[in-house]
Image (cartoon, helix red, strand yellow):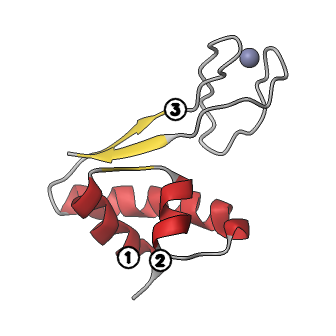
């Protein structure tokens, strides 16, 4: 089973996930965060064909409230804070 396939099963089961949840649930190396984010994008296309929709709640700066459009962002472009919430992926 590929990472994308595992991710799709997990998403359909849990309905909402962050990259950290996936790393923990699938016992992945935390260094694979970028691969997980790419897998979410691929999973979105596969889910669409299955009749689901993958929604993304973008990361938000917890200091100034700025919403970051980059799902892998780790730093706020506005206030430079690194206190950023994780992107949440939801399936419906
Ligand atoms: Zn900020």
* Callout 2 secondary element: helix
| Nearer-N-terminus badge (1/3) | 1
The Cα–Cα distance between marks 3 and 2, rounded to whole angstroms, is: 22 Å
Q: Position of residue 27 (x, y in %)?
A: 54, 76
Graded by Cα atoms within 10 Å as few (under 14), some (14 to 19) or many (20 or more), the crowding at tag 3 reads some
Residue 36 in which image quadrant? bottom right
- Residue 3's tag is 2
- Residue 82's tag is none
The Cα–Cα distance between marks 1 and 3, rounded to whole angstroms, is: 22 Å
Say whether mark 1 is within 8 Å of ligand 1: no
Say whether mark 2 is within 8 Å of ligand 1: no
Disc 3 target residue: 58
Depicted 77 relative to depicted 43: above or below: above
Q: Are marks 1 and 2 in contact (CB under 8 Å)?
A: yes
Ligand 1 occupies quarter: top right
Say whether mark 3 is within 8 Å of ligand 1: no
Q: Position of residue 75 (x, y in %)?
A: 78, 32
* Callout 1 secondary element: helix
- Residue 6's tag is 1
The Cα–Cα distance between marks 1 and 2, rounded to whole angstroms, is: 5 Å
Left or right side of 28 for 43 = left
Left or right side of 61 for 82 = right
Comparing 74 with 83, the one in front is: 83
Farthest-out residue, bottom:
1
Farthest-out residue, top:
64
Graded by Cα atoms within 10 Å as few (under 14), some (14 to 19) or many (20 or more), the crowding at tag 2 reads some
Q: Residue at x 62, y 67 (%)?
A: 35
Left or right side of 65 for 14 = left
Q: Residue at x 35, y 59 (%)?
A: 45
Q: Quadrant of the N terminus?
A: bottom left
* Callout 3 secondary element: loop
Comparing 8 with 51, the one in front is: 8
């Amino acid at each position: 089973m590929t990472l994308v396939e595992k991710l799709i099963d997990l998403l359909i089961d849990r309905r909402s996930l962050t990259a950290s949840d996936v790393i923990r649930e699938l016992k992945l190396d935390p260094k694979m965060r970028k691969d997980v984010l790419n897998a979410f994008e691929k999973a979105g296309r596969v889910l669409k064909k299955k009749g689901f929709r993958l929604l993304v709640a973008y990361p938000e700066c917890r200091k100034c409230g700025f919403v970051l459009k980059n799902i892998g962002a780790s730093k706020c472009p506005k206030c430079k804070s690194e206190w950023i919430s994780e992107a949440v992926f939801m399936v419906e």
